[in-house]
Amino acid sequence: MATVLEPPLQPLDVSRRPRRAAPLWLVVVATSIPMFMATLDNLVMTTALPVVRADLGASVGQLSWFVNAYTLAFATFMLPAATLGDRIGRRRMMTAGVVLFTLASAAAGLATTSGALITARAVQGLGAAAIMPLSLTLLAGAVPVAKRAAAIGIWGGVSGLGVALGPVIGGAVVEGISWQAIFWLNVPVGLVAVPLLVAAVRESRGLPSRLDPLGTLLLGGAVFLGVWGIVHGNDDGWTSAQVLGSLLVAGALLPSYLLHARRRPDAVLPLRLFASRGFSVANAVALTFTLGIFGAVFLLSQQLQIVLGYSPLEAGVRTLPWTAAPMLVAPIAGALAPRTGLRALLVAGLALQTAALVYLALMTNDAATLTYPSLVPGLVMAGVGMGLTFAPNATAVLDGLPDSDFATSSSANSTLREFGVALGVALLTAVFLANGGQLSPTGYDGAIAPALLTGAAFVGVAALAALFAPGRRRTRG
């Protein structure tokens, strides 16, 4: 009988062996640290603006651009970054964003002119565009559906931590070192974030689709020109040729994109996503909520220094009742979402913020009677309201959508949120200036209340939109 010889044992090909999944907590940390860095830089400059203004001789319009250059680039390029991430790998794209963000932070720290700082902030925004939405996408894809709301709650808490520590870190570093150092802090964080992201997070891709350069140009151009016109309206005049022209072109590009996207199922922002109620409501909330709230933060953080005479650090610490609350409330909201439903949390959070801005408008309008303790109730209400909004809104935008659409849907939501930040700073500053506002101890009298009430009106619209958010899902017994 013939003997059957078995082939010799071959060494295991370790390169083809599926990588063991990292612990869930490590995935949360790896995706949240870069997102923390990106959200930190939304507000890190707010308490430093008076110092930067004096050092660089910046105008009021340039002060807005120190914030808006970041948020504008952030908003414009998130959707293209999501599309590229679906094609070349989401983790790879996010890692590239962290590297670019870190290099741009170093450039901002070296800036000696307003133009150089604005340019570096814009490049930071490009890096952040590949960080924040893809961090949520990678996290949501790595977490079981049953634990997704809680994980997003933690993610939202870290986002809240970035919001909370932005003014405090900015104030502390400006007072203790220099305003340039607030950007150098990002460099060691980026050096830690890159290897952690590569080690802990699995690569993922979306459904293969063609790039949409025309749609990207139309939609990105509408965002860019719209915000550019609003920001420059304060300095150049709302009827000037460049401001009016940019707004008119932006208004023409948006419907042009809609016509383009109707004929193209793989558009950079597919219109089919709006068939999801959660996606549509979450985006309406993201735009109107951030427009009202972050424009108010921009004005109030400067009022604490200019009117009440606090140092940058003292002003940052005194914003904590507002900015620290989301860090504590967002994880709780994420854990409660499966029980209460998203609608109840969103409506409660947005109603609290609307009431808070009305209260703060009444308290801050007269410098002669303004005291910090009188602001605390409004700051606390606003902070708790933000915490109840962050995580449920991030969950709602993914509600009912397949995993393959997570990158695009979360990018669209982040785009509108960052557009709202830029638009809110520009619009509320315009209202402030239109009512005779000036950056002086008495320049806020009669000017800040109309601006804050404008912000309250937009947050109130967000609360009405939230009434249509998905409610609590009924389980069948």
Image: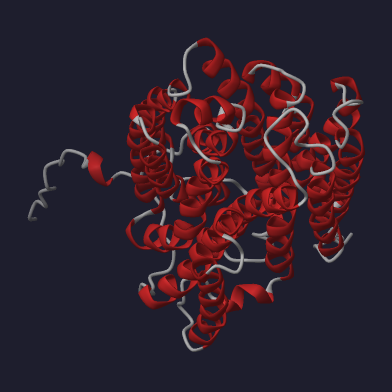
Which residue occupies 49% across, 51% down?
74
Q: Is residue 131 left or right of residue 305?
A: left
Q: Residue at x 36, y 72 (%)?
A: 211
270 w.r.t. 181: above or below: below
Quarter in which the C terminus is drawn: bottom right
In screen coordinates, is 333 left or right of 188?
Answer: right
Task: Give percent across and percent down for residue 32.
Answer: 54, 36
Quarter occupied by residue 101? top left
Residue at point 74% right, 65% down?
281
* Residue 202: % across, % down: 41, 45
Q: Residue at x 33, y 33 (%)?
A: 107
Please indicate, yes or no, whether residue 74 appears anywhere in the rendered image. Answer: yes
Dividing the picture into quadrants, the one containing residue 43 is: top right
Question: Is residue 403 in sight in this rendering?
Answer: no
In the depicted structure, whether residue 254 falls above or below residue 293? below
In the rendered view, does 15 fall on the left or right side of 322?
left
Image location (x, y in percent) of residue 119:
38, 44
**Total numbered circles:** 0
**Residue 338 versus residue 60: which sits nearer the camera?**
60
Q: Residue extending furthest left?
A: 2
Position of the N terminus by quadrant: bottom left
The image position of residue 58, as x and y in percent, is: 49, 36
